[in-house]
Amino acid sequence: MTATAPTHQEHLRRQAVGLAWLTVAWNVVEAGVAVAAGSAAGSMALIGFGLDSTIEVGSAAVIIWQFAGLEKEREQRALRFIALSFFALALYVSIQAGLDLVASNEPESSWVGIGLAVVSLLVMPVLATAKRSVGRRLGSVTVTADSQQTWLCTYLSVVLLVGLVLNTTLGWWWADPVAALVIAALATREGLEAWRGDQCCG
């Protein structure tokens, strides 16, 4: 039994790192598509969603570094940087969404954005469930906490999808900046969790 235990643990560690790399790959694609589509449509919700995905790459990277033996001090500095990035994102999106509401800037419809949100809703729950399973079997608070972060990304996808669909189908242009404000609020929450180390350090 003792001879096989380390092998099993190592297998779970590899799974955890593999899931983190998969998260990085998906968020890179998601960020690129969201920012490009958001800029084309003038959608602050899409741009904010894309910028959030960019920061998530750094968050997942901390998990990878941790399993590679990252020093605790460097890990904490990385988390603080990620937290400040979330706060900057929340401030930027809040200001721009607020200006859009005041000036009644109507974004164009974005079927690309809607498609991205739908695909994200299919991908993120699978990733989150897999991370939670591996984290619990590995006994890792870090990986389990990261699964919660991925679930939060799923909620962001829901907010984005609702805002884009309302704008596209009913012409409720204000749904887009309102969705952006909700994304900003959730980004602030993510920033607070990263600052406290809840995301990656447990």
Image (cartoon, rainbow, N blue to C red):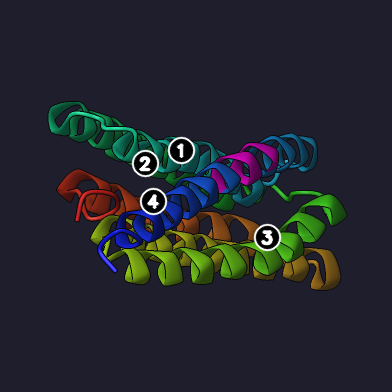
- Which amino acid type is marked by label 3? Ser
Element assignment for label 3 = helix
Residue 120, label in figure: 3
Element assignment for label 2 = helix
Task: Please tell me which residue is depicted at 42% across the width and 63% down the height of the picture.
Answer: 147
Pointer 2 residue:
86
Q: Do the residues labelled 3 and 4 touch (CB within 8 Å)?
A: no
Q: Quadrant of residue 82?
A: top left
Task: Please tell me which residue is depicted at 19% across the width and 48% down the height of the picture.
Answer: 197
Pointer 1 residue:
55
* Of labels 1 and 2, the one closer to you: 1
Element assignment for label 1 = helix
Task: Please tell me which residue is depicted at 39% across the width and 44% down the height of the picture.
Answer: 90
- Which amino acid type is marked by label 4? Glu
The percent coordinates of residue 163 (x first, y second) are 66, 65
Element assignment for label 4 = helix
Circle 2 packing at 10 Å, graded few (<14), some (14-19), many (20+), is many
Name the N-terminal-most of marks 3 and 1: 1
Q: Is residue 172 left or right of residue 26?
A: right
